[in-house]
Amino acid sequence: MTEKPDQVAGLLLAAGGGRRLGGRPKALLEHRSHLLVEHAADALRAAGCASVHVVLGAGADDVRKRAVLPGCVLVDNPEWTEGMGSSLRAGLASLRGTGARAALVSLVDQPDIGPEAMARVLAAYTSRESLAAASYGGTRGHPVLFGAAHWEGVAAAAVGDRGARDYLRTHDDAITLVECGDVGQPYDIDTAADLDRLE
């Protein structure tokens, strides 16, 4: 029996320190009069996620003071300097015991991936074994949906800045790719030149 998508939690990785941006925490960059962390959390909520967990690291105290994140669960990652893998592990750990049966994982520094793309990937959820990812012109990107049956394996493979890349590579045949190139572009805000993409 197909399960309900209201069992999918949003998981926003927002701990990055913006090393190539001169140490400006990415969560606190502004886009369309909102902080990037607000923009991304709102998109997950609008896509239909039952709850949204936000993993914080760099500038966590400032994010807590400045960001308007109603209903979000804020998760501190004291090991954020180790890379995205530590944030993914912290986020998945925060979902255990919540009743969530899948996590829709999104990145704070991809402002052109909005609720339309997220909702499409969320719609690929069918069970705890689900594994799906957005595709842009045939290239896999974010967001990525992990059914709870995958969480332990993803966490074990999430090392450094690789996040879930190695896990996804070894489970390539099981991934449902969801084309989203018509509703979003997967660019990152990584360098000073990328700041021109923010409005």
Image: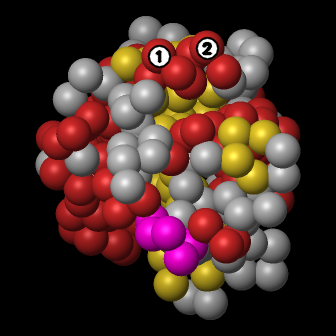
Q: Residue 162: x, y in percent? A: 24, 59
The residues bearing labels 2 and 1 have C-alpha atoms spaced at a distance of: 6 Å
Q: Is residue 133 left or right of residue 79?
A: right
Q: Is residue 76 left or right of residue 124?
A: left
**Residue at (50, 69) in percent of width and height:** 192
Q: Which residue is mark 1?
A: 61
Q: Residue 198: x, y in percent? A: 71, 63
Q: Give residue 3's mark.
A: none
Residue 18 seen by the camera: yes
Magenta span: predominant SS is helix
The magenta span reads 190-194
Above-or-below relation of 117 to 103? below
Splitting the image into 4 quarters, where does residue 129 fall?
A: top left
- In the picture as drawn, the residue positioned furthest to the top comes out as 97
**Residue at (80, 81) in percent of width and height:** 182
Task: Confirm whether the magenta stretch covers residue 102.
Answer: no
For mark 1, does the 10 Å Cα neighbourhood hold few (<14), some (14 to 19), or many (20 or more) residues? few
